[in-house]
Every structure is written in C-alpha cells, then in structure tokens.
Image (cartoon, rainbow, N blue to C red):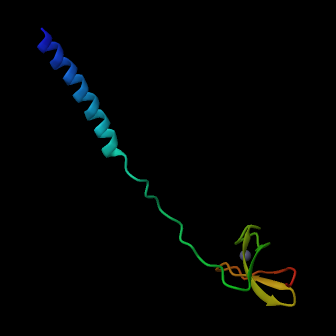
C-alpha cells in the first residue's frame, strides 16, 4: 500500500519535471529580423519633404542644395525645400 503511494508520488514528481523540462526546452531566445543600421552621411539633414506624391510630407533625409535649399534624397523624389542653412 505504501509502495503504491510512493509510486504515485514519484509519477506526479516525474510528470511535473517533464512539464518544466519541456517548457525550458521550448524557451528559445527571441531572434527577430533586425533593422539595418545606416549611418547618416555628413551634411545631410532630416527635414519635412513636401512632395506629397513620393514622401507624403514625412521627414526624410535632405542633402544641401545651396542657397538655403535642401534636396530630398529619397529615390524618385529630389524635391527641394527651403531650410535654415547652418
Ligand atoms: Zn521627398
């Protein structure tokens, strides 16, 4: 009778350990898709591009175009916008 009780207790312990081991094995480190890092070249600024067709008035990277103007570097845009020249 006592032996039967011990076997039942051991079965419960073994089951609990198996569940924990299963959870441990399933826990994998989260490896997601990482964004690529792009260094912003010197002399460029993030300004609002008013070309609604391409950039949709979002902040995009602009390169200096002279006379206080900045040219959007988004492919297919090239819109110039006036900004402070410093
Ligand atoms: Zn643009």
Is residue 15 shown left or right of residue 77? left
Q: Is residue 2 left or right of residue 70?
A: left
Q: Which residue extends farthest front?
A: 2
Residue 66 location (% of width, % of height): 83, 91
Q: Quadrant of the C terminus?
A: bottom right
Query: Which of the 4 quarters of the picture holds residue 30?
Result: bottom left
Q: Is residue 26 above or below residue 63?
A: above
Residue 16 picture quarter? top left
User: Looking at this rendering, what residue extends furthest in the top direction?
Assistant: 1
Query: Which one is nearer the viewer's eye here, 42 or 46?
Result: 42
Q: Position of residue 83 (x, y in %)?
A: 86, 79
> Which of these two is toward me, 59 or 24?
24
Q: How many marks?
A: 0
Q: Residue 68, how many percent across, how many down?
A: 87, 86
Question: Percent position (x, y) of residue 57?
Answer: 77, 67
Residue at the image point whose x is 50% and y is 64% from the top: 34
Occupied quadrant, residue 79? bottom right
Q: Quadrant of ligand 1?
A: bottom right
């Amino acid at each position: 009778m006592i032996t039967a009780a011990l076997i039942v207790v051991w079965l419960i312990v073994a089951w609990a350990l198996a569940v924990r081991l299963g959870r441990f094995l399933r826990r994998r480190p989260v490896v997601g898709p990482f964004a690529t890092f792009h260094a912003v070249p010197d002399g460029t600024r993030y300004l609002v591009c008013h070309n609604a067709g391409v950039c949709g008035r979002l902040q995009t990277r602009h390169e200096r175009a002279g006379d206080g103007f900045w040219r959007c570097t988004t492919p297919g845009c090239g819109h110039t916008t006036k900004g402070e020249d410093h």
